[in-house]
Amino acid sequence: MVPPDVFEEIWQKVLENIKNEVGEKTYNTWFNEFLPQTYIHNCLKISVPSKFIKDWLEKNFYHTIYKIVKTYFPEIKTIEFVVNSSTNSYVIKQKSTVIKRLQSLALKSHQKLSIFDVNPQTNLNPRYRFDNFVVGKSNELAFSACQAVVKNLGNLHNPLFIYGPVGVGKTHLLQATGNEILKIYKNLKIKYLTTEDFTNQYINAIKNQTTEEFRFKFRDIDVLILDDVHFLSGKISTQEELFHTFNFLYNLSKQIIFSSDRPPFLIPDIEERLKSRFEGGLVVDINPPDFETRVAILKLKSQERGVVFDDFVYEYIAEKFTNNIRELEGALSLVIFESKFVDKLTPEKLKEILKKFTKEQFNKFTPKKIIKTLLSHYEIKEEDIIKQIRSKHLVKIRQILIYFLREYSHLSYTSIAEIFKKDHTTIIYSYEKIVKELKENENLKQEIEIIKSKLLEN
Ligand code: ADP
Ligand code: MG
């Protein structure tokens, strides 16, 4: 296991900041052997060469140092200086737990810092690139469509519409496409934003009577990337505005890229004319990655974090977490963190680490949470489920709900029957119907995946 150099890098930044703050001369005199020594209970002990220096630093620079360290390691609550005659004993590569703890803290801060890298003009985050996107069967169509868009801006796939459940890499691909375009065409105006952001900006523009500015801003763009357009469902006036923005840009052959959690025809409450715009170019889906792709993603992510595990680690995680990549990353983070405190990561140890994680994430949703998630997903009310309304649509939703309760909560058939005021054979029938349908109906499968990821997200 190679420890990351990120910590060293960040500690270097801390020192640079201190130098800027106190001036080079003071820095060279007093901060010459200023080294982290232990980190326990959120207290960082920094070793300094003598009592004299310790007293002087405490008196004159405690707050400056505290403020700067805290910026990079937000978790740290207190700082102490300790006199250490052999400060050189601190070696970044040594395997002491202290250093490892600090490293993982540094990693966390490092990731947090990356939000500052987002370019305020384009909203693009350089962290998302084509070269760190693992391509497999589940996403190769979407990936090559994005590459083709970069090569044929505005005139091949316009608009490009990518859809798929939560956590399969839609945002990553959209952002990577934006970054790639920016790299090649430095002068183009690219704008990435979430549909929620677009909606909020539009609402504010109406409120502040600045719709003219809003319009100008969104028409003076060469590439518009709008993430999660399913959010437009039911938002009629934003839909109308987007429709006009779309037409304006489209007529000038400006490239437009959309993403959504489902194909256009399945987005409820959306105007026909906008739907047909969404469908007017290329529509491609991204699916949850297969086992090999999951393993490859895990390897890449851990490499990015300077960690290399034995293959069994990646394979085990990839087996346990099957659809949402965010979840896969979460499990990996936990393993990276916990593995710093064990001498050797054995399969048993790994299992133990992940047990807690999986238990919390899976199998144990409360029935209340499941019901709430489904109601909001289908935008229906509780009574609609309980009442014996026999509309085809509601019957299906009821069956899906029963399937979820049976599969993802601890409720027995009998208790589920009580909720629905039905006898338990009906419940078994509904559950089995969905199980059977899942084997042959791709749309339903996708629907279930979407709900599953919503459950995990909330
Ligand atoms: P979505 O927008 O579909 O919900 P994201 O793009 O936010 O999903 O992806 C979730 C996480 O998984 C991100 O950290 C992203 O970098 C990562 N990810 C998704 N797909 C891939 C992939 N094919 N290769 C590498 N990382 C990926
Ligand atoms: Mg996304």
Image (spheres, rainbow, N blue to C red):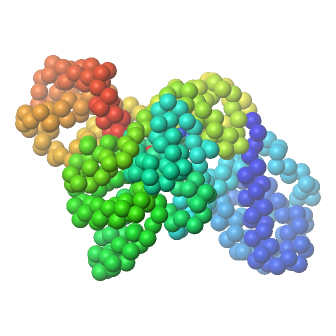
Position of 4 with respect to 331 (left or right) is right
Q: Residue at x 44, y 48 (%)?
A: 156
Image quadrant occupied by the N terminus: top right
Q: Taking 319 as reference, is 67 above or below it?
A: below
- Percent coordinates x, y for residue 296 in the rendering: 60, 32
Front residue of 330/57: it is 330
Answer yes or no: is residue 201 visible.
yes
Q: Residue at x 61, y 44 (%)?
A: 132
- In the picture, residue 317 is in which quadrant? top right
Q: Residue at x 39, y 51 (%)?
A: 159
Q: Residue at x 32, y 69 (%)?
A: 202
- In the picture, residue 50 is in which quadrant? bottom right
- Percent coordinates x, y for residue 457 in the rendering: 40, 45
Position of 268 with respect to 163 (left or right) is left
Answer yes or no: is residue 125 visible.
no
- In the picture, residue 343 is in which quadrant? top right
- Percent coordinates x, y for residue 298 in the rendering: 60, 35
Position of 98 with respect to 417 (left or right) is right
Front residue of 431/262: it is 262
Position of 179 with respect to 343 (left or right) is left
- Percent coordinates x, y for residue 46 in the rendering: 79, 61
Q: How many marks?
A: 0
Front residue of 13/351: it is 13
